Image (tube, rainbow, N blue to C red):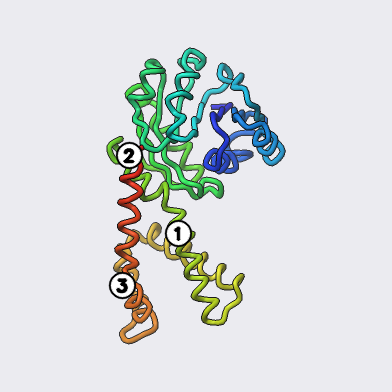
């Protein structure tokens, strides 16, 4: 794939553009259609890509990424019908939108439903994807593409709402935890800058340990929780405050919202 086109230039699209620009695609081979002229100018200036209100690149791109709001998805795909080549790989990141709803507009195309998250902008996305039948033969290529931007896993389409609730929305939960932990650090006497760096790196390191050791988080937690020590005191307060339950409920609530969309 040499050229990629985006329909929609919002926050998630920009995160993907930031992640792929200069690493996967040359900026000159990235095309964006966005309805806001000011946003087009912003993206063009920031990344050196081609951005305009028109989607006059549809016949030239190998990969199309549709990143629009759920309420605009039906109208957007209808407007693209008949303009996208059958050889173009169509991918989309729209919460709640099933493959069948897109296939009716492009029955001959390879279509992939994707759910990355905003960490794609720093090459650390957790991306889940589901292939339609036409795209089965390019599954490895799809996975390899998203592996350049973090981690990637193929899931059954029925699980995509759960993916949205967990990893799609997950960075927001992590940002909230970093902010809260840094507040605690400030309350304990650290400067704000020190507290944020300490909190962010701590979560990053803990996550890396889970991914690289393959050990269950409970096992790793036990290893750093000494009897009558400082860590168990902190864990005890978190459990009493319902932190675990709140995170579980957050994922379930976001999953239900994705289904409703």
Q: Whole-percent x and y of residue 214?
A: 34, 59
Q: Earlier in the sequence, mark 2 or mark 1?
A: 1
Looking at the image, which residue is at 29% across and 41% down?
159
Q: Could you tell me how far apart the alpha carbons at marks 2 and 3 are, in whole angstroms? A: 31 Å
Closer to us: 181 or 258: 258
Mark 1 Cα-neighbour bin, 10 Å: few <14, some 14–19, many ≥20: some
Q: Earlier in the sequence, mark 1 or mark 3?
A: 1
Q: Whole-percent x and y of residue 125?
A: 47, 47
Q: Earlier in the sequence, mark 2 or mark 3?
A: 3
| 89 vs 123: above or below | above
Q: Whole-percent x and y of residue 203?
A: 46, 64
Number of numbered discs on residues: 3
Mark 3 Cα-neighbour bin, 10 Å: few <14, some 14–19, many ≥20: few
Q: Quadrant of the C terminus?
A: top left
Q: Quarter-wise, where is residue 247 in the image?
A: bottom left
Looking at the image, which residue is at 46% across and 54% down?
172
| 118 vs 226: above or below | above
Q: Which residue is mark 3?
A: 239
Mark identifier at residue 214: none
Q: Could you tell me how far apart the alpha carbons at marks 1 and 3 are, in whole angstroms? A: 18 Å
Looking at the image, which residue is at 36% across and 85% down?
229
Q: Which residue is mark 1?
A: 174
* Secondary element at tag 1: helix
Dots 2 and 1: beta carbons under 8 Å? no
Q: Quarter-wise, where is residue 13 in the image?
A: top right
Looking at the image, which residue is at 51% across and 68% down?
199
Depth check, mark 2 against mark 1: the one in front is: 2
* Secondary element at tag 2: helix
Q: Which residue is mark 2?
A: 260
């Amino acid at each position: 794939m040499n050229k990629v086109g985006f329909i929609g230039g919002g926050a998630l699209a920009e995160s993907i553009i930031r992640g792929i620009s200069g690493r996967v695609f040359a900026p000159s081979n990235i095309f964006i259609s966005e309805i806001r002229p000011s946003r087009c100018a912003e993206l063009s200036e920031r990344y050196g890509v081609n951005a305009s209100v028109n989607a006059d690149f549809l016949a030239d791109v190998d990969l199309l990424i549709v990143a629009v709001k759920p309420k605009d998805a039906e109208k957007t795909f209808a407007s693209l019908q008949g303009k996208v080549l059958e050889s173009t790989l169509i991918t989309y990141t729209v919460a709640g939108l099933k493959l069948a709803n897109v296939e009716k507009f492009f029955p001959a195309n390879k279509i992939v439903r994707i759910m990355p998250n905003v960490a794609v902008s720093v090459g650390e996305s957790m991306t889940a994807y589901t292939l339609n039948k036409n795209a089965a033969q390019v599954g490895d290529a799809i996975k390899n593409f998203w592996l350049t931007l973090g981690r990637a896993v193929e899931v059954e389409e029925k699980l995509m709402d759960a993916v949205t609730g967990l990893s799609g929305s997950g960075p927001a939960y992590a940002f909230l935890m970093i902010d809260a932990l840094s507040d605690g650090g400030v309350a304990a006497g650290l400067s704000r800058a020190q507290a944020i760096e300490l909190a962010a790196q701590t979560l990053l390191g803990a996550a890396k340990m889970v991914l690289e050791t393959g050990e269950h988080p409970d096992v790793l937690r036990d290893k750093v929780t000494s009897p009558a020590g400082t860590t168990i005191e902190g864990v005890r307060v978190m459990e009493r405050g319902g932190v675990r339950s709140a995170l579980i409920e957050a994922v379930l609530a976001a999953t239900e919202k994705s289904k409703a969309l």
